[in-house]
Structure formats: C-alpha cells, structure tokens
C-alpha cells in the first residue's frame, strides 16, 4: 500500500500541472502547439494551470486532472506485476500522466496528437525490450508486438467502416495500448478491447437522452480506451491475486 500511496500522491501533484500542456496541444491537426496566451500574449510554459501574467485559467480544471492521474497511478501501482518499487512507481506515474493528458486532449478538442502517441509507442517498445533483456522473457515481448497488431487491426477496421466514429488517432492509441497490455498477457488484451465499448455505451446513451449529441455525432473514444486499459490491468490483477 505504501507504493500505491506514493504513486497516488506523485501522480496527483504532477497531474495538477497538466492543464497548460493540454491547452497548448489542443490545436487543429498539423498546427504547432500554442506558444502564447490567447488573452494577453504571455509566452506559455509546459506546466501549470493558468497564464502567469493575466491569471486566466487554461485547459481543464487542475483538480480533475490531478484526481484522474493520482487514481490512475495508484491503481497501476497496485496492479502491475510485482517488481522493484523504483521501477513500478515511476512506470505507474508516467503511464497515468500520459493517459490523463491524452484523455483530456481528446475530450477538449477531439483528437489524439500524433506527436505524443507515436513517440510514446517507440519509447514503450524500447522500454519493454530493455525489461525483456533483463528478465529474459522474450515471449512477453513477442506477445506485446502481437497485442499491438491485434488491437490496432481491430480499430483500423472500425476506422475504415463508414460511420464508425473512430479517428485515426484512436488507431494509433490502440497500437500503444496493445503493446503494453500484450506484454502483460492475452487476457489483458481481450479485456482492453472489450471494456472501452462497455464504458462508452452508457456515456453515449446518456448524452443522446440529454440531447447533448446526435446519432451521428462523434464522441471522443480515447478516454474510454485509456480507462478500459487501466481497468483491464486492474481486473486481471484482482483475479490472479
């Protein structure tokens, strides 16, 4: 529990600094990140909750990103395979911050930036290769590659279907999630594929009943994919424990 508490606290503190990065990255596809405040022209930094000059709040509420990142880091710290705290805690925090940031961006501007997702795939693949080299578990690395292939193929097929309401950013995110879930095991991959739809369906239903979206509206799917991946890891950890 001590490891989880450290992860929660660190994830929450760092998660509170995500609003400005989210705001900077919420730009049309192909545009560079925002460099200045839209209200006063002050140059923006890469961490914080508001403009340093005019104090205008930027991005989502800091407490929301802090709560999501903190909870996510704690759940992952409890659910990831046993290992040195010096590895489990940082990994949990980094994954929670990455997921919280990507989810917030998708909710805010309905896109998942390739300049965040694609480097994350490369870093994830290298990190898992290093771990496999240390443990000698090369089968897990092969499973990670297959998991990435399977999840991305499923989402690519849905992306290509007219009216599928998935963006190509979701396909890229599926590669990253499939890589990480596949390294843990095939049950994680299966649940990582199913849970996002189970989470997204009631949300869409409520939005439809409330008149917030139409039948053809595109509801961001990235947050459900990310939440589903975390729940898949937690579920399999609970069942195996």
Image (cartoon, grey):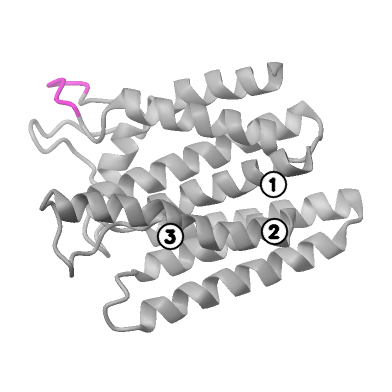
Task: Check residue 236 in the rendering and tell me which mark sits there, or answer none.
Answer: 1
SS at badge 3: helix
Q: Position of residue 144 (x, y in %)?
A: 71, 63
Q: Assess disc 3: are there few (<14), some (14-19) or many (≥20) residues with their C-alpha within 10 Å of its C-alpha.
A: some
Considering the image in quadrants, where does the N terminus appear?
A: top right
Q: Distance between the Cα atoms at labels 2 and 3?
A: 16 Å
- Read off the residue under disc 3: 197
With 201 as the anchor, is 184 left or right in this view?
right
First in residue order: circle 2 vs circle 1: 2
SS at badge 1: helix
Classified by dominant secondary structure, the portion drawn in magenta counts as loop
Q: Distance between the Cα atoms at labels 3 and 1?
A: 18 Å
Residue 116 lies in the magenta-colored region: no
Q: Which residue occupies the extreme left position in the image?
A: 39
Classify 110 as above or below 101: below
Considering the image in quadrants, where does the C terminus appear?
A: top right
Q: Examine the rendering and report whether any part of residue 137 can be seen.
A: yes
Classify 16 as above or below 193: above
Span colored in magenta: 52-57
Q: Assess disc 2: are there few (<14), some (14-19) or many (≥20) residues with their C-alpha within 10 Å of its C-alpha.
A: some
- Read off the residue under disc 2: 187
Classify 152 as above or below 64: below
Q: Position of residue 164 (x, y in %)?
A: 32, 75
With 148 as the anchor, is 50 left or right in this view?
left
Classify 78 as above or below 95: above
Quarter-of-image position of residue 51: top left
The structure residue drawn at horizontal position 56% and vertical position 38%, both measured from the top left corner, is: 94
The structure residue drawn at horizontal position 65% and vertical position 38%, both measured from the top left corner, is: 91
Q: Disc 2, disc 1: CB below 8 Å? A: yes
36 vs 129, nearest the viewer:
129
Quarter-of-image position of residue 157: bottom left
Q: How many marks?
A: 3
């Amino acid at each position: 529990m001590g490891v989880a508490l450290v992860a929660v606290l660190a994830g929450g503190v760092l998660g509170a600094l995500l609003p400005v990065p989210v705001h900077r990255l919420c730009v049309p596809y192909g545009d560079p990140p925002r460099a200045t405040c839209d209200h006063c022209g002050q140059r923006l930094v890469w961490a914080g909750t508001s403009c340093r000059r005019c104090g205008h709040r930027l991005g989502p509420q800091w407490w929301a990103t802090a709560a999501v990142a903190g909870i996510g880091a704690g759940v992952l710290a409890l659910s990831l395979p046993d290992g040195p705290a010096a590895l489990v805690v940082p990994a949990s925090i980094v994954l929670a911050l990455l997921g919280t940031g990507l989810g917030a961006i998708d909710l805010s501007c309905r896109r998942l930036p390739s300049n965040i997702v694609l480097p994350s795939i490369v870093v994830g693949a290298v990190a898992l290769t290093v771990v496999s080299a240390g443990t000698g578990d090369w089968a897990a690395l092969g499973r990670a590659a297959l998991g990435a292939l399977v999840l991305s193929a499923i989402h690519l097929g849905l992306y290509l279907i007219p009216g599928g309401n998935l963006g190509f950013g979701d396909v890229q995110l599926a590669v990253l999630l499939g890589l990480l879930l596949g390294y843990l095991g095939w049950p994680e991959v299966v649940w990582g594929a199913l849970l996002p739809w189970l989470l997204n369906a009631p949300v869409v239903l409520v939005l439809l009943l409330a008149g917030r979206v139409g039948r053809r509206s595109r509801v961001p799917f990235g947050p459900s994919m990310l939440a589903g991946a975390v729940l898949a890891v937690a579920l399999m950890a609970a069942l195996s424990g």
